[in-house]
């Protein structure tokens, strides 16, 4: 239901950081936000999100605190740390360079060589 | 600091584990509820929404596990989990677990025992300060300074040692006022304790300043152990006067508990000054330069900066000087230095223990090979389970970790069991007194070193045999196996497991061969021809000096003793030999003899150095040494008669050419007197069982009396009752004879300590190395055989169980029993034959080494070869019996229905 494309390895962390950078979110909210910003094109297994969240917390990129969700349920909210914001910037730059390079490489036509 | 923080966070995580778990659980639950809320909003009813939310979420446990891993620091946790899981798995196959633990326990126990012995007699230094610079002048066959005057010269002329001390043995009757008992100690030079830099536990030691000429220092220092056992740690003992061989000595001190003199094998009861040895021995041994009985070993610390090589050269120079100055008494051959503690036994003992260690290592390797193949077979059997776990998302790492945990658990259990056994064994060994009446013990009580080695060996072997199935797990393809089952066979390729088995059988073959060679050799050496007949012979060691006899009263008393022995009922004949009889305590006295025409009697001109025995007229009859030519001695061969000798065949042949030409000829001894050969006796063994044939001469004891002698008493093996109508034969009890002998001797002199033993029991000393070697090899051989049995059994059982289906089809198609067996077990037998052949050949090569320890050990004996082949066949039969039965009892119908 969350779209069709498989995630490239290593892109999940970046997506999570991006989603959280737009405002504090709980785990399910992160999934919804990723679906929303990718226009439902990226598929994430629901349970697979949590190892990634814990990994990012341990690396000090996210911090977590318990709060109450819009459904009036207890939930754990994640937000970016300073370190996380910096990492997101770096990874976004890196991704854009890679995407541009891949894009131009894949659109190359015989007459351009 | 970082490490500390890690430890703290780890501790916190372990401690708060349940809290973190709860936290995680709640978060995942909250996720599912949010999802369910959404689904409900989109139109599903409550229960259905919750159900599909859970399904969408996926493997709850797996994600939790991964999350925990992502949190880090779960190493210990996983370890505990793995251990718990492994224990559960092992409990499911107790047969495998028990076999594996037992195998390892045996192998590690053997290694721990051998290492304990090595630790005790080779690695553990003597308990004295600065042990590493303490060196002794080696005790060789013809050493340069075994006389006391030579020792004094060596002490004063060398420039390499801080100081040199020396000691010899003193066997005495020790009388504290109550019952006189035998005690063994060291007669040491005054500087002995000062050279060793040891301090007394009580009182004082004697010093060089106490030595003021012969018999000037009647002092005795007790060892702690003797003080503990004989004086009950009475602190008032210092200053008390006791009698050593009827001479008063004052107890001046007690040694420290850990100090046991300077010989590892011997724990002396006491120490006395060597200048008083005349009182104890009855004659002075300190004055004659040619008397090699003066001191046993001279030892001292090297001066700082002096290397052992320099010191040896220095000793050589002194030896050369002595030989030049005293050409008649000193023949200097070579001098070498050895670490104090083992003297000349060091080399052989080290070689023997190293050999044992090697064999024990082989056993351990074989055990590892064995367990490795068992593990491999198990892993193959469990390949389906492994595949399932992989398919369900377990990582290969985790599966391998489980495998290793299982192996380490087994190896730790085996190591612990083996160590326990070895501790018991070593404790008993260290209390063992191999020889009756000699203060000899093996200092092998286990210590921390032994425990460490056992632990390390256990862990190492665990990893070693867990390595075998690693490749198998790594190659597992879950899809293939789950689809097709585990029957995919590797074909007829030679696998690592096969190779391991062959290696292991070869090792077992080596052990079986060497132990058989040793056993056969020992058996032969026990029934060999010694030149005398030790059966039905009782020996009584009597040192008349212990009862205060001097001069002419000695041979008079000895004559009376002999006559008294002959009056005992059942005694056939009695004789006497000065010092020790042949093959007793490896004490052989060498003499230097010359051809008659030689006039310059210096050691280098010697024609022969035969063993010398001073014997009474009845000796040859009592010892049953056959007279080949001439006559034996008579009571007329005394001080006033011409000097005569009886020589053995080897002496006659080497000196005179033949037995018949020897009688009536003369030769010369060191003091220049001509000796007439009156008889020739058969050859024999004199000092050790493995010696080459040596010349020996026998002199009449009346012409060179000595107060220390052994009575040799031969008794009839069985006796008859005197009742004329009912003759009943019964075996005579040697202890009866011994008691009668002691009674007769007590009648002659009440205060005479007597030591009675059968000749055979005293032979245990010379047989000791061979017996120990045989015992050790026997045990190792048996262990090797057991390991092969379990190894082949495992392999055969595995082969049969894997091919049950195939066997069933073959039987259904009409295969005969023989063909079934061939299919099932042909490979096992081929491996067995190959391994045994390799082992046999290697064993024969290894047995050459054995020949130096065990008399007449030769692998080229058809008996040995046949024995090895039969033993290996038996091993094979035993090991394949159960798998063969299983293969034959296959019922094709049930089997085909089941599969």
Image (cartoon, rainbow, N blue to C red):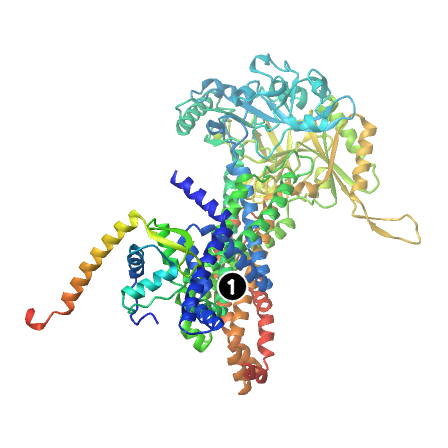
Q: Residue furthest bottom?
A: B813
- Seen in the picture, residue B829 relative to B852 is either above or below; the reply is below
Which of the two residues, B181 or B412, is positioned nearer the viewer here? B412
Please tell me how many numbered marks the rendered image carries: 1
Task: Give coordinates of residue A43: x percent, y percent.
Answer: 32, 68
Which of the two residues, B216 or B590, is positioned nearer the viewer here? B216
Residue B688, quarter of picture? top right
Which residue appears at 80% of the width and 45% of the height?
B733
Which of the two residues, B365 or B218, is positioned nearer the viewer here? B365
Which of the two residues, B400 or B755, is positioned nearer the viewer here? B400
- Seen in the picture, residue A21 relative to B174 is either above or below; the reply is below
Whether residue B559 is visible here, answered yes or no, is yes
Q: Chain of mark 1?
A: B
Q: Report helix, strand or loop for mark 1.
A: helix
10 Å crowding of disc 1: few (<14), some (14-19), many (20+) = many
- Seen in the picture, residue A37 relative to B13 is either above or below; the reply is below
Q: Is B226 left or right of B33, judged from the image as shown? A: right
Task: Give coordinates of residue B701: x percent, y percent.
Answer: 68, 30
Task: Give coordinates of residue B473: x percent, y percent.
Answer: 43, 65
Q: Is B493 left or right of B421, judged from the image as shown? A: left
Whether residue B488 is visible here, answered yes or no, is no
Task: Give coordinates of residue B481: x percent, y percent.
Answer: 44, 74
Which residue appears at 79% of the width and 24% of the height?
B178
Residue B68, quarter of picture? bottom left
Which residue is tagged 1? B374
Quadrant in which the N terminus of chain B appears: top left
Residue A113, quarter of picture? bottom left
């Amino acid at each position: 239901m969350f779209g069709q494309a498989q995630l490239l390895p290593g892109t999940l962390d970046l997506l999570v950081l991006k989603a959280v950078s737009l405002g504090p979110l709980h785990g399910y909210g992160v999934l919804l936000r990723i679906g929303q910003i990718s226009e439902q094109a990226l598929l994430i297994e629901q349970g697979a999100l949590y190892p990634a969240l814990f990994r990012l917390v341990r690396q000090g990129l996210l911090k977590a605190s318990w709060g109450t969700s819009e459904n009036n349920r207890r939930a754990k909210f994640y937000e970016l740390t300073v370190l996380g914001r910096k990492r997101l910037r770096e990874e976004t730059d890196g991704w854009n360079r890679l995407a541009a390079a891949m894009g131009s490489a894949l659109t190359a036509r015989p007459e351009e060589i | 600091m970082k490490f500390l923080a890690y430890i703290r966070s780890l501790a916190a995580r372990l401690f708060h584990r349940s809290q973190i778990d709860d936290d995680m659980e709640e978060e995942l639950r909250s996720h599912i509820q949010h999802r369910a809320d959404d689904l409900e909003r989109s139109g599903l009813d409550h229960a259905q929404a919750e159900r599909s939310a859970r399904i969408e979420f996926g493997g709850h446990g797996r994600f939790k596990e991964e999350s925990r891993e992502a949190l880090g620091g779960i190493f210990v946790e996983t370890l505990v989990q793995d251990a718990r899981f492994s224990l559960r798995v092992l409990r499911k196959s107790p047969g495998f677990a028990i076999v594996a633990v037992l195998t390892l326990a045996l192998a590690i126990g053997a290694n721990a025992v051998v290492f304990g012995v090595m630790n005790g007699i080779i690695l553990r230094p003597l308990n004295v300060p600065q042990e590493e610079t303490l060196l002794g002048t080696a005790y060789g066959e013809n050493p340069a300074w075994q006389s006391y005057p030579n020792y004094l010269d060596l002490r004063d002329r060398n420039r390499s040692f801080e100081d040199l001390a020396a000691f010899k043995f003193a066997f005495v009757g020790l009388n504290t006022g109550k019952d006189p008992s035998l005690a063994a100690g060291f007669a040491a030079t005054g500087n002995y304790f000062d050279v060793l830099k040891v301090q007394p536990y009580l009182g004082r030691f004697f010093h060089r300043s106490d030595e003021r000429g012969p018999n000037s220092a009647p002092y005795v220092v007790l060892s702690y152990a003797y003080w503990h056992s004989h004086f009950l740690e009475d602190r008032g003992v210092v200053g008390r006067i006791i009698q050593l061989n009827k001479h008063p000595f004052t107890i001046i001190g007690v040694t420290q508990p850990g100090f046991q003199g300077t010989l590892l094998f011997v724990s002396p009861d006491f120490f006395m000054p060597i200048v008083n040895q005349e009182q104890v021995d009855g004659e002075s041994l300190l004055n004659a330069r040619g008397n090699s009985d003066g001191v046993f070993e001279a030892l001292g610390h090297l001066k700082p900066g002096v290397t052992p090589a320099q010191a040896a050269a220095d000793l050589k120079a002194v030896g050369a000087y002595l030989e030049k100055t005293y050409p008649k008494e000193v023949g200097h051959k070579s001098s070498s230095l050895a670490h104090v503690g083992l003297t000349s036994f060091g080399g052989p003992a080290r070689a023997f223990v190293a050999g044992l260690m090697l064999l024990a290592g082989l056993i351990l390797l074989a055990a590892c090979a064995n367990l490795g193949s068992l593990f491999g077979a198990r892993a193959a059997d469990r390949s389906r389970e492994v595949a399932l776990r992989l398919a369900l998302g377990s990582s290969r790492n985790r599966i391998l970790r489980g495998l290793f945990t299982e192996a380490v658990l087994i190896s730790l259990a085996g190591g612990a069991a083996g160590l326990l056994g070895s501790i018991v064994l070593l404790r008993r060994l260290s209390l063992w007194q191999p020889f009756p009446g000699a203060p000899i013990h093996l200092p092998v009580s286990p210590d921390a070193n032994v425990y460490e080695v056992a632990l390390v060996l256990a862990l190492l072997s665990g990893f070693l045999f867990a390595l075998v199935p690693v490749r198998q797990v790594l190659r597992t393809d879950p899809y293939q196996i789950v689809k097709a089952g585990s029957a995919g066979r590797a074909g007829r390729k030679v696998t690592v497991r096969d190779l391991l088995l062959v290696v292991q059988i070869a090792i077992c073959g080596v052990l079986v061969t060497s132990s058989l060679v040793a056993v056969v050799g020992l058996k032969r050496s026990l029934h060999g021809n010694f030149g005398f007949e030790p059966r039905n012979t009782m020996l009584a060691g009597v040192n008349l000096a212990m009862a205060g006899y001097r001069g002419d009263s000695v041979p008079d008393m000895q004559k009376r003793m002999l006559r008294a022995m002959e009056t005992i009922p059942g005694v056939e004949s009695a004789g006497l030999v000065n010092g020790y009889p042949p093959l007793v305590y490896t004490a052989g006295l060498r003499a230097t003899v010359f051809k008659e025409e030689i006039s310059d009697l210096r050691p280098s001109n010697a024609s022969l150095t035969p063993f010398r025995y001073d014997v009474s007229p009845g000796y040859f009859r009592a010892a049953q040494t056959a007279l080949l030519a001439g006559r034996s001695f008579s009571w007329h061969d005394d001080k006033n008669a011409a000097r005569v000798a009886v020589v053995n065949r080897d002496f006659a042949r080497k000196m005179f050419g033949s037995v018949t030409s020897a009688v009536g000829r003369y030769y010369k001894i060191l003091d220049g007197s001509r000796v007439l050969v009156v008889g020739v006796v058969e050859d024999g063994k004199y000092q050790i069982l493995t010696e080459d044939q040596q010349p020996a001469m026998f002199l009449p004891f009346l012409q060179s009396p000595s107060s220390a002698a052994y009575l040799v008493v031969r008794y009839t093996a069985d006796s008859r009752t005197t009742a004329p109508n009912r003759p009943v034969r019964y075996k005579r009890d040697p202890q009866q004879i011994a008691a009668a002998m002691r009674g007769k001797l007590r009648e002659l002199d009440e205060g005479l300590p007597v030591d009675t033993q059968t000749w055979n029991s005293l032979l245990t000393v010379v047989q000791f190395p061979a017996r120990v070697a045989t015992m050790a090899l026997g045990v190792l051989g048996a262990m090797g055989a057991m390991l092969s049995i379990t190894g082949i059994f495992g392999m055969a059982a595995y082969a049969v169980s894997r091919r049950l289906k195939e066997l069933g089809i073959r039987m259904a198609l009409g295969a005969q029993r023989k063909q079934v067996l061939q299919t099932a077990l042909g490979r096992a037998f081929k491996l067995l034959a190959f391994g045994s052949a390799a082992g046999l050949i290697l064993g024969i090569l290894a047995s050459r080494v054995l020949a130096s320890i065990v008399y007449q050990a030769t692998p080229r004996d058809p008996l040995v070869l046949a024995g090895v082949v039969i033993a290996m066949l038996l091993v094979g039969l035993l090991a394949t019996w159960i798998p063969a039965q299983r293969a034959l009892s296959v019922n094709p119908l049930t089997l085909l229905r089941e599969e």
